[in-house]
Image: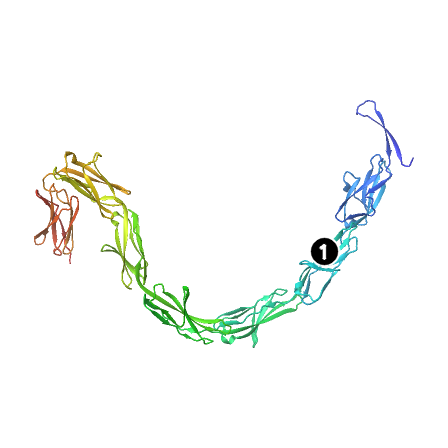
Amino acid sequence: MTEFEQSVIWYCESVDGSNASPKVSLRIAFDVHNVSLIPNDNPLTIREGIQKVVQCVVNRNAVPAPTITWYLGSTDITNRAGTNTTSITLTGNKTDNNKMLHCRATNNNKPPKTLSTTLNVEYQPKINTLSQQDITEGGDLLVTSSVIPGNPSSTTFYWTKVDNPGFRQNGPTLQLYNIQRTSSGTYRCIAENNYSNGERGTDSQSMVVNVLYPPIVIAMSQQDIIEGRVLSVTCTVTPGNPSSTTFYWTKVDNSEFRQNGPTLQFPNIVRTSSGAYRCTAVNIYSNGEKGTHSQFMAISVLYPPIVHKLSQQDIIEGKDLSVNCTATPGNPSATTLYWTKVDNPGFRQNGPTLHLPKIKRTSPGTYKCTAENIYNDREKGSGSQSLVINVLYQPTIESKQLQIVNESVKVILTRNISSNPLSNASWYSKTELLITQTSVTTASFIIERATCIDTKNFTLVVSNGVGSTATAMVELIVNCKPIPDKINITTGVSFTKGIEFSSTIIAYPEPLYELEYKNGKRNNQIMNNITRNAVNNFTVYFRQPFVDQRSFGLYYLILRNLFGESTVIVNVIEQRTGKPEPPRNTAVVCEITQARVQWISSFDGGNQQYFTVIILNGQDGTNLSYSFHDKGENELHAAHINNLQPLVTYWFVVSAKNNYGSSPSEITNCKTVQG
């Protein structure tokens, strides 16, 4: 053998796997004779927690490829290398420090060749846990930290404060002399060693320094309190450490006085309670000692003047008012009086007398007489009494525009009333009293369903016993379709008399009208015009001086506005001579000594007619008669008959008469009532 071992191996093999004649191959095997590690440091330095790859290199001519195994100490760690065992990745672990790493390589069943190196695992020092330090303010604090050395073991120490970037103390011992409460906080001890590459390994531990100190009672100002009031004074502190605080109060000139708790309470203080009181605050340190602090507070019991009671003043607007205020002096006795008004911050009258000349309705309200004295600390003691002033004035009614509504709607007429005292309000339709309301600020009248005839001026009369009565006109207009006074008109005309008739209409707004023949054609010879009788009452007049045969016949008078339409049938006939048709729908109502008779007129027979009401006394057989003018065809006529006797039955008949005869109505009767 030469300087390296070699072997020659002969063997036969079929190249293609067939039964052909085998070929002969010759391969020369070389043993592993040289092993090296990359890196080749000894010791091999690795940082804790850091990975490092180590490669095992053998002589390049080693055939077949060698088997490589890795050992850390006596432990086989080849499985860490995976399928390619020529290199292995190590992670620094302080427990592996100073252990040997072995690479073993072998082939050809020869003894393995081994190369080893020592692991030098560098790691930081470890500071032992530091406990909280409780120390009384003014004491000295010395705390030394201990450490588990790292690798390298040489360690340097220093201290910092979490909330103070400028604080630093070198060395393992924290020294704080005559410690103050501002030194409380978290301190950190830091230990360092220097790794071989110049970097540092660092560990730190925090330590809470808890400086114990008493609470500080906040200074309290003197309490000036009016006699009889509730006094509650709370003692407050800047908390100490620990912050839990107990309180108690004592009185300088009374050794038996003590109240526990932060609040000094007098539910009904008297003047003998004046004096100096001390609030003491206590906290308990962790070592069982107590921290205490106290402050004095003075109490001065004061009392104001007393204002004598004032009676309500009722006065009529425009009169002069003068009210005098008196008071029993307080302590001190010097007293100032003045007047204010509760609802008017700008009102003030100095002196004991309130003057209100020619008082106005805007002046009522609650006035206050205040009496003041000035205490030694310049604060004011005051007493007051209220005075109610009631200004009486006559009513006024608000002004509003007319109200326009549609037919059939519910209507509420309202007017606000200003008066003191409240007023009684009465609504009238002309002289008819509709409703009276008592003690109201708003007068109202309701029409459940408005009709055309509700268009009118209502009168509102208001009084409250002060001054004169107030009156207002309340105008209501109802929008409605035209309603003619009659829907059938028969007029007899002659060739010399001509056509002349009219129709009175209730409507709002003013209606338009057309008169046309039954067949829709118009009579262009007839003249017409319309007259407004009232805001919703109109009369349409038609006149044709000369007529011919074509003028006779049936006409339609069409009336319309925005709210509807109505038609009046007008029958123009040739005038004939004959007695009138009898009155119809006769009715009579008896009272004590009078009766009301009404009827509707019929066609006058072509000649001017008049009416006679004939009354027969059913008791003695006497009769009376009264004549009345004709208002036109189909008109409602009414007559009041006087001078009747009570408890007598009377018979009535209405007779229509012209130059050609008369026609009586049906006979009706009624009995007068007891007087």
Check the image and report above or below for 303 versus 655.
below
The residue labelled by disc 1 is 204
Which residue sits at x=51%, y=70%? 231
When asked about the image quadrant of residue 513, the answer is top left
Q: What element carries label 1?
A: strand
Residue 380 coordinates in the image, percent (x, y) = 47, 71
Residue situated furthest right in the rendering: 1
When asked about the image quadrant of residue 500, the answer is top left
The reply, left or right, for residue 128 in relation to residue 603 is: right
When asked about the image quadrant of residue 221, the answer is bottom right
**Front one among 341 and 529:** 529
- The image quadrant where one finds the C terminus is bottom left
* Residue 587 can be seen, yes or no: no
**Front one among 589 and 142:** 142
- The image quadrant where one finds the N terminus is top right
The reply, left or right, for residue 203 in relation to residue 590 is: right
Which residue sits at x=27%, y=62%? 468
Check the image and report above or below for 322 versus 553.
below
Residue 487 coordinates in the image, percent (x, y) = 20, 42
Residue 135 coordinates in the image, percent (x, y) = 68, 65
Structure colour scheme: rainbow
